């Protein structure tokens, strides 16, 4: 079967950043990357190989996965078989609020690379969640129940402590402010008074990516948001920090699976009643 990719993204207007993506891929491998929101996904068809902690595992149809924001992970197809998934993307304010009723501290929840469950209960709750997107109270109730199931099924993966490397955390915060700029290891070495090889080693130990790959992922996340607007592709590329449209398109296809214009064509702003987290 020849390779293909198809993505449909539905954004609810003024919905505190909640949106749903449905994607179908065949012969597409995605590099290690992250999303700036919580990603709550359901493998709808087929199976994929997934890695978020240095080990690859197969995830099959019916499995539910929760990935924290900026948790580095990679996905790839298995053989030449297609796989499809749906994902609900949730902003941090909503998840911080909902996590209060799950028995796990939000800061601890962020340290877990991913949560996964193949239980019938998790799947039923996920399907119910997508049915109540426009009802804030019911949405929060179902989301809390689903998070509790995912935490229970993944509790063996909960960390014993939080990461304490303050230098890498300072680097991450700085990159979030300056990702549009041209940044080298030498720049980070001078700014943080640290040998460039130590910079690379500590950054990869903390994030799973090199500083340059982390910056590229940040730029792609920014571009995905801007593609909802009517700006030109060349302007979006410039605003995100790419030095020309060609390089932007190549990186976007590598990380997202489609060219920027194809991704834009698959996006839809829903005009239904908005969701509020309170």
Image: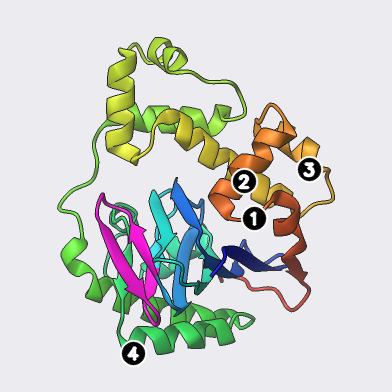
Residue corresponding to mark 3: 233
Closest to the camera, between mark 2 and mark 4, is: 2
**What secondary structure is the stretch in magenta mostly built from?**
strand
- Looking at the rendered structure, the secondary structure element under dot 4 is helix
Asked if residue 33 shows in the view, the reply is no
Between disc 2 and disc 4, whose residue precedes? 4
Magenta includes 52? yes
Between disc 2 and disc 3, whose residue precedes? 3
Between disc 4 and disc 1, whose residue precedes? 4
Between disc 4 and disc 3, whose residue precedes? 4
Residue corresponding to mark 2: 252
Closest to the camera, between mark 4 and mark 1, is: 1
The magenta stretch is: 48-65
Task: Specify the quadrant of the image occupied by residue 271.
Answer: bottom right
Name the residue: 51% across, 51% down.
36
Residue corresponding to mark 1: 258
Measured Cα–Cα span from mark 2 to mark 3: 11 Å
| Relative height, residue 187 to residue 249 (above, below) | above
Closest to the camera, between mark 1 and mark 3, is: 1
């Amino acid at each position: 079967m020849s390779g293909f990719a198809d993505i449909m993204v539905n954004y609810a207007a003024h919905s505190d950043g909640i949106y749903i993506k449905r994607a179908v891929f065949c012969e597409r491998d995605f590099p290690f990357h992250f999303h700036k929101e919580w990603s709550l996904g359901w493998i709808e068809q087929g199976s994929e190989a997934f890695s978020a902690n240095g080990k690859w595992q197969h995830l099959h149809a019916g499995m539910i996965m929760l990935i924290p924001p900026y948790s580095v992970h990679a996905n790839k197809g298995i053989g030449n078989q297609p796989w499809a998934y749906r994902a609900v993307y949730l902003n941090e304010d909503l998840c911080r609020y909902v996590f209060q009723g799950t028995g796990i501290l939000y800061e601890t929840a962020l340290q877990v690379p991913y949560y996964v469950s193949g239980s019938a209960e998790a799947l039923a709750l996920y399907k119910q969640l997508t049915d109540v997107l426009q009802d804030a109270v019911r949405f929060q109730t179902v989301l809390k129940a689903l998070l509790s199931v995912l935490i229970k099924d993944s509790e063996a993966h909960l960390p014993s402590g939080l990461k304490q490397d303050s230098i890498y955390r300072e680097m991450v915060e700085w990159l979030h402010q300056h990702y549009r700029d041209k940044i080298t290891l030498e720049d980070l070495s001078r700014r943080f008074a640290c040998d460039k090889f130590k910079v690379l080693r500590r950054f990869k130990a903390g994030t799973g990516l090199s500083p340059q790959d982390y910056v590229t992922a940040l730029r792609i996340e920014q571009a995905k948001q801007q593609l909802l607007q009517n700006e030109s592709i060349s302007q979006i590329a410039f605003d995100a920090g790419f030095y020309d449209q060609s390089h932007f398109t190549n990186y976007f296809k590598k990380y997202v699976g489609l060219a920027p214009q194809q991704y834009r064509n698959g996006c839809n702003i829903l005009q239904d009643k908005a969701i509020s987290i309170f």
